[in-house]
Image: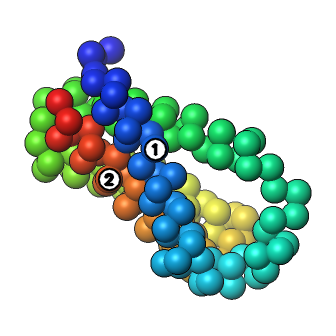
Amino acid sequence: MHEVNLLAVLVAGIVPMIVGSLWYGPIFGKRWMSLMEMTAEEIQEGFNPVKTYGVTLLLSLVTAFVLAQLIAEVGGGSAMVGVHVALMALVGFILPVANQSIAFEKRKPGLAWLNVAYNGVALLAQALVIALWR
């Protein structure tokens, strides 16, 4: 394993939470709820913020650490390396999973692509934090 900047990983781990609060809030919140065919009240039913946000933050930290390892592996230290690694992860890992949710789980394509776009923006932002903060 490569030595990475753990403070950059911590900050990059928080980035998807910020992006998500904007993405699924003021930017695309209404569209997302429409695609989910749910109201805000239905979404809040049984919602456990500690469990939901805790697990999400933990997994975001894992993603940031793995991104840091990949960026270090390819000799990263520039924005372009960060963007390259994030786009490779998006195309190689996130797109196939999104397609599976459409093809086998009968998810709405619009919902899957809205989520793919969020993940792409979050990954790019995480990778930029890591690549530039060395």
Q: Position of residue 112 (x, y in %)?
A: 57, 70
Q: Secondary structure at mark 2?
A: helix
- Mark 2 or mark 1, whichever is nearer to me: 1
Q: Quadrant of residue 43?
A: bottom right
Q: Which residue carries the number 2 mark?
A: 125
Q: Position of residue 92 (x, y in %)?
A: 39, 50
Amino acid type of the residue that numbered disc 2 sits on in the rendered structure: Ala
Residue ID at (69%, 85%): 34
Q: Quadrant of the C terminus?
A: top left
Front residue of 55/50: it is: 50
Front residue of 44/127: it is: 44
Amino acid type of the residue that numbered disc 1 sits on in the rendered structure: Ile
Residue ID at (46%, 64%): 118
Disc 1 crowd rating (10 Å Cα; few below 14, some 14-19, many 20+) is: some
Q: Quadrant of the N terminus?
A: top left
Q: Quadrant of residue 42?
A: bottom right
Residue ID at (72%, 72%): 106
Q: Position of residue 79 (x, y in %)?
A: 15, 48
Disc 2 crowd rating (10 Å Cα; few below 14, some 14-19, many 20+) is: some
Disc assigned to residue 14: 1
Residue ID at (34%, 24%): 6
Q: Secondary structure at mark 1?
A: helix
